[in-house]
Image: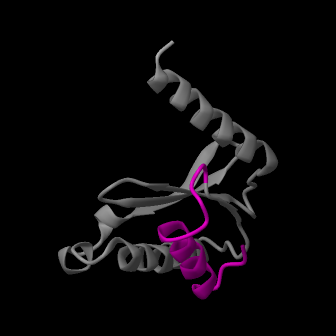
Amino acid sequence: MNKYSVHKSAKLRRIIKAKSKLTGESTKPRICVFRSNKNVYVQAIDDESQKTITAFSSLNLDQKVKHKKNIKVAGVVAEEFSKRLKDKGIKKAVFDRRWYKYHGIVKTIAEGLRAGGLKI
């Protein structure tokens, strides 16, 4: 076993441990965050029926907004995502940050969701 597979399995263990404590329902979905080096992705998941309710990413934004700093883009993504959830009638959610620390982009997304009127 090389060092890369050990790192991957440790990351996977952290994800599984965090997911075991969080479950989403159709009325209170789990909001999952994924960030890459270039883009930010957010999706609402219903764990009971194992379906994605809605998703949004920085790829859906205008070109003017896309070329700003990642933290500013994350705030815009969170506000647009909370509007989509409001349109679907969802007011409460569970925030799943996966293995990321709660700072920077992840914190900005959570604050943007709260600013959009979503209870996390």
On the rendered structure, is 93 left or right of 57?
Answer: right
Q: Is 3 rendered above or below residue 34?
A: above
Q: Is residue 48 visible?
A: no
Instruction: Say which quadrant the C terminus sits in.
Output: bottom right
Instruction: Tally the numbered discs.
Output: 0
- Which x, y percent locates residue 2? 46, 16
On the rendered structure, is 20 left or right of 70?
Answer: right
Q: Which residues are magenta?
A: 98-120
On the rendered structure, is 96 left or right of 41?
Answer: right
Colouring used for the render = one colour
**Res 17 → quadrant:** top right
**Res 63 → quadrant:** bottom left
**Res 12 → quadrant:** top right
| 90, 5: nearer the viewer | 5
| 104, 116: nearer the viewer | 104
- Identify the residue shown where x is 34% and y is 66%: 58
Residue farthest to the top?
1
- Identify the residue shown where x is 58% and y is 37%: 11
- Identify the residue shown where x is 33% and y is 55%: 37
Residue farthest to the front?
3
Q: Is 64 rendered above or below residue 105?
A: below
- The verdict on residue 116 being magenta is yes
- Identify the residue shown where x is 64% and y is 85%: 117
Q: Is residue 62 visible?
A: yes
- Which x, y percent locates residue 68? 26, 78
- Which x, y percent locates residue 76? 41, 79
- Which x, y percent locates residue 59? 30, 62
